[in-house]
Image (tube, rainbow, N blue to C red):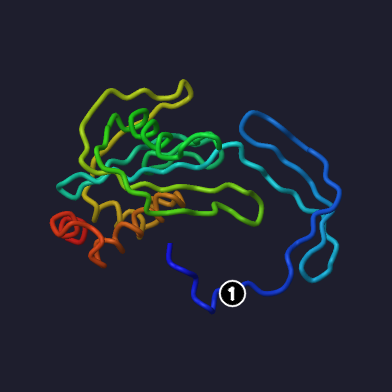
Amino acid sequence: MTPKPDWMKAHGRPWKRGPVRVMYDNPWIRVREFDAEAPTGARAPYGLVEMKNYAIAVLPLHEDGTVTLVGQNRFPLGYSWEIPEGGGPLEADPLESGRRELKEEAGLLARNWRLILRMQMSNSVTDERAFGYLATSLTPTDTDPDPTEDIAVVRVAFSQAMEAVAAGHIDDALTVAMLLRTYHMASKGELSSDLARSVLS
Protein backbone atom coordinates (compact mmCIF):
# COMPACT_ATOMS: atom_id res chain seq x y z
CA MET A 1 0.00 0.00 0.00
CA THR A 2 1.38 3.41 -0.97
CA PRO A 3 1.80 6.07 1.74
CA LYS A 4 -1.00 8.59 2.22
CA PRO A 5 -0.38 12.03 0.73
CA ASP A 6 0.24 14.94 3.10
CA TRP A 7 -3.22 16.42 2.56
CA MET A 8 -4.78 13.34 4.19
CA LYS A 9 -3.16 14.00 7.56
CA ALA A 10 -5.66 13.63 10.43
CA HIS A 11 -6.54 16.73 12.42
CA GLY A 12 -8.10 17.41 15.82
CA ARG A 13 -8.56 14.85 18.53
CA PRO A 14 -10.45 11.54 18.45
CA TRP A 15 -13.75 10.71 20.11
CA LYS A 16 -13.50 9.67 23.77
CA ARG A 17 -15.45 6.60 24.84
CA GLY A 18 -16.97 6.70 28.31
CA PRO A 19 -19.19 4.20 30.14
CA VAL A 20 -20.96 1.74 27.84
CA ARG A 21 -23.89 -0.64 27.95
CA VAL A 22 -24.97 -3.42 25.61
CA MET A 23 -28.38 -2.67 24.09
CA TYR A 24 -28.72 -5.73 21.82
CA ASP A 25 -26.69 -8.82 20.98
CA ASN A 26 -27.12 -11.73 18.55
CA PRO A 27 -24.76 -14.04 16.59
CA TRP A 28 -24.20 -11.39 13.87
CA ILE A 29 -24.23 -7.96 15.55
CA ARG A 30 -23.94 -6.23 18.91
CA VAL A 31 -25.31 -2.76 19.60
CA ARG A 32 -23.61 -0.76 22.36
CA GLU A 33 -24.38 2.73 23.60
CA PHE A 34 -21.52 4.89 24.86
CA ASP A 35 -21.45 7.98 27.02
CA ALA A 36 -19.07 9.69 24.61
CA GLU A 37 -17.28 12.99 24.12
CA ALA A 38 -16.97 14.39 20.60
CA PRO A 39 -13.72 15.86 19.19
CA THR A 40 -15.24 19.28 19.90
CA GLY A 41 -15.67 18.46 23.60
CA ALA A 42 -19.46 18.14 23.33
CA ARG A 43 -21.04 15.28 25.27
CA ALA A 44 -22.98 12.87 23.06
CA PRO A 45 -24.58 9.46 23.65
CA TYR A 46 -23.37 7.29 20.79
CA GLY A 47 -24.84 4.03 19.49
CA LEU A 48 -22.39 1.69 17.75
CA VAL A 49 -23.35 -1.37 15.73
CA GLU A 50 -20.49 -3.85 16.04
CA MET A 51 -20.32 -6.50 13.33
CA LYS A 52 -19.22 -10.03 14.10
CA ASN A 53 -18.23 -10.71 10.47
CA TYR A 54 -16.35 -8.97 7.70
CA ALA A 55 -18.34 -7.95 4.63
CA ILE A 56 -17.06 -9.94 1.66
CA ALA A 57 -17.69 -9.07 -2.00
CA VAL A 58 -16.57 -10.87 -5.15
CA LEU A 59 -16.75 -9.49 -8.69
CA PRO A 60 -16.70 -12.50 -11.06
CA LEU A 61 -15.25 -11.16 -14.32
CA HIS A 62 -15.34 -13.57 -17.27
CA GLU A 63 -12.82 -13.54 -20.10
CA ASP A 64 -15.37 -12.04 -22.51
CA GLY A 65 -15.93 -9.06 -20.22
CA THR A 66 -19.23 -10.26 -18.78
CA VAL A 67 -19.91 -10.31 -15.06
CA THR A 68 -22.07 -12.60 -12.98
CA LEU A 69 -24.64 -10.88 -10.78
CA VAL A 70 -27.09 -12.30 -8.27
CA GLY A 71 -30.57 -11.10 -7.39
CA GLN A 72 -32.27 -11.64 -4.08
CA ASN A 73 -34.73 -10.15 -1.62
CA ARG A 74 -32.95 -8.31 1.18
CA PHE A 75 -34.78 -7.89 4.50
CA PRO A 76 -34.21 -4.13 5.07
CA LEU A 77 -34.75 -2.65 1.59
CA GLY A 78 -36.23 -5.32 -0.69
CA TYR A 79 -34.97 -6.76 -3.97
CA SER A 80 -31.34 -6.16 -4.94
CA TRP A 81 -29.11 -7.03 -7.89
CA GLU A 82 -25.52 -7.27 -6.73
CA ILE A 83 -22.28 -9.18 -7.03
CA PRO A 84 -21.88 -12.25 -4.79
CA GLU A 85 -21.56 -11.01 -1.22
CA GLY A 86 -21.78 -12.23 2.32
CA GLY A 87 -20.21 -12.32 5.74
CA GLY A 88 -16.87 -13.80 6.65
CA PRO A 89 -15.86 -14.68 10.22
CA LEU A 90 -13.38 -12.20 11.72
CA GLU A 91 -11.02 -15.03 12.60
CA ALA A 92 -11.03 -16.48 9.05
CA ASP A 93 -9.02 -15.46 5.98
CA PRO A 94 -11.30 -13.09 4.00
CA LEU A 95 -10.13 -14.74 0.77
CA GLU A 96 -11.48 -18.10 1.89
CA SER A 97 -14.77 -16.43 2.71
CA GLY A 98 -14.78 -14.96 -0.79
CA ARG A 99 -14.22 -18.38 -2.35
CA ARG A 100 -17.14 -19.73 -0.34
CA GLU A 101 -19.49 -16.89 -1.32
CA LEU A 102 -18.66 -17.21 -5.03
CA LYS A 103 -19.46 -20.92 -4.99
CA GLU A 104 -22.54 -20.66 -2.79
CA GLU A 105 -24.26 -17.80 -4.59
CA ALA A 106 -22.99 -17.87 -8.18
CA GLY A 107 -21.93 -21.49 -8.66
CA LEU A 108 -18.43 -20.46 -9.75
CA LEU A 109 -14.83 -21.30 -8.93
CA ALA A 110 -12.00 -18.90 -9.76
CA ARG A 111 -8.35 -19.69 -10.40
CA ASN A 112 -7.20 -16.07 -10.01
CA TRP A 113 -8.07 -13.83 -7.06
CA ARG A 114 -7.05 -10.24 -6.45
CA LEU A 115 -7.93 -8.03 -3.50
CA ILE A 116 -8.88 -4.72 -5.13
CA LEU A 117 -10.93 -2.90 -2.51
CA ARG A 118 -11.18 -2.30 1.22
CA MET A 119 -14.13 -0.33 2.52
CA GLN A 120 -15.66 1.02 5.71
CA MET A 121 -19.33 0.34 5.14
CA SER A 122 -21.00 3.05 7.25
CA ASN A 123 -18.39 4.41 9.61
CA SER A 124 -20.65 6.78 11.53
CA VAL A 125 -22.74 3.97 13.03
CA THR A 126 -20.94 0.66 12.47
CA ASP A 127 -17.41 -0.79 12.60
CA GLU A 128 -18.07 -3.06 9.60
CA ARG A 129 -15.11 -3.49 7.25
CA ALA A 130 -15.33 -4.95 3.76
CA PHE A 131 -12.94 -6.81 1.46
CA GLY A 132 -13.59 -6.84 -2.29
CA TYR A 133 -12.01 -9.41 -4.61
CA LEU A 134 -11.77 -9.55 -8.37
CA ALA A 135 -12.20 -13.19 -9.42
CA THR A 136 -11.10 -14.31 -12.91
CA SER A 137 -10.41 -17.56 -14.81
CA LEU A 138 -13.84 -18.82 -13.82
CA THR A 139 -15.34 -22.30 -14.08
CA PRO A 140 -18.86 -23.44 -13.16
CA THR A 141 -19.71 -25.59 -10.16
CA ASP A 142 -22.81 -26.33 -8.11
CA THR A 143 -24.35 -23.55 -6.05
CA ASP A 144 -24.83 -24.07 -2.33
CA PRO A 145 -26.99 -21.20 -1.04
CA ASP A 146 -27.66 -20.50 2.61
CA PRO A 147 -31.02 -21.91 3.82
CA THR A 148 -32.42 -18.34 3.92
CA GLU A 149 -31.33 -17.43 0.36
CA ASP A 150 -33.45 -17.62 -2.79
CA ILE A 151 -31.02 -16.40 -5.45
CA ALA A 152 -31.30 -15.66 -9.17
CA VAL A 153 -28.09 -15.63 -11.24
CA VAL A 154 -27.48 -13.66 -14.45
CA ARG A 155 -24.46 -12.99 -16.64
CA VAL A 156 -24.37 -9.58 -18.32
CA ALA A 157 -21.88 -7.40 -20.17
CA PHE A 158 -19.77 -5.21 -17.90
CA SER A 159 -21.16 -2.16 -19.73
CA GLN A 160 -24.72 -3.26 -18.92
CA ALA A 161 -23.87 -3.51 -15.24
CA MET A 162 -22.34 -0.03 -15.33
CA GLU A 163 -25.42 1.34 -17.10
CA ALA A 164 -27.61 -0.19 -14.39
CA VAL A 165 -25.49 1.59 -11.76
CA ALA A 166 -25.77 4.91 -13.61
CA ALA A 167 -29.55 4.48 -13.87
CA GLY A 168 -29.89 3.71 -10.17
CA HIS A 169 -31.11 0.15 -10.77
CA ILE A 170 -28.06 -1.26 -8.98
CA ASP A 171 -27.48 0.65 -5.74
CA ASP A 172 -25.81 -1.88 -3.45
CA ALA A 173 -22.74 -0.03 -2.14
CA LEU A 174 -20.21 -2.83 -2.55
CA THR A 175 -21.41 -3.68 -6.05
CA VAL A 176 -21.21 -0.06 -7.17
CA ALA A 177 -17.75 0.36 -5.64
CA MET A 178 -16.39 -2.88 -7.12
CA LEU A 179 -17.66 -2.11 -10.62
CA LEU A 180 -16.17 1.40 -10.50
CA ARG A 181 -12.87 0.09 -9.12
CA THR A 182 -12.63 -2.50 -11.89
CA TYR A 183 -13.44 0.10 -14.54
CA HIS A 184 -10.69 2.31 -13.12
CA MET A 185 -8.24 -0.61 -13.21
CA ALA A 186 -9.11 -1.27 -16.86
CA SER A 187 -8.61 2.38 -17.80
CA LYS A 188 -5.28 2.62 -15.94
CA GLY A 189 -3.71 -0.52 -17.41
CA GLU A 190 -4.06 -2.62 -14.25
CA LEU A 191 -5.81 -5.46 -16.12
CA SER A 192 -4.59 -7.56 -19.04
CA SER A 193 -5.09 -5.78 -22.36
CA ASP A 194 -7.77 -8.23 -23.56
CA LEU A 195 -9.72 -8.05 -20.32
CA ALA A 196 -9.39 -4.27 -20.13
CA ARG A 197 -10.63 -3.94 -23.71
CA SER A 198 -13.71 -6.03 -22.95
CA VAL A 199 -14.45 -4.04 -19.78
CA LEU A 200 -14.11 -0.66 -21.52
CA SER A 201 -16.04 -1.57 -24.68
Residue found at x 27% / y 32%: 108
Please tell me whether residue 136 is drawn above or below residue 190 in the rendered image: above
Residue found at x 22% / y 37%: 138
Task: Pinpoint residue 28: horizontal percent, then vertical percent.
Answer: 61, 33
Foreground residue among 146 and 97: 97
Task: Pinpoint residue 182: horizontal percent, then vertical percent.
Answer: 31, 57
Instruction: Write down the quadrant of residue 32 in the picture.
Output: top right
Apparent side of residue 51 relative to residue 82 in the rendered image (left or right): right
Residue found at x 30% / y 34%: 153
What residue is pinned by disc 1?
Answer: 9
Apparent side of residue 21 relative to residue 71 in the rendered image (left or right): right
Instruction: Write down the quadrant of residue 163 in the picture.
Output: bottom left
Q: What residue type is labelled 1?
A: Lys
Indicate the quadrant containing the C terminus: top left, top right, bottom left or bottom right.
bottom left
Indicate the quadrant containing the N terminus: top left, top right, bottom left or bottom right.
bottom left
Foreground residue among 127 and 171: 127
Task: Pinpoint residue 67: horizontal percent, then vertical percent.
Answer: 25, 45
> Mark 1: which secondary structure?
loop
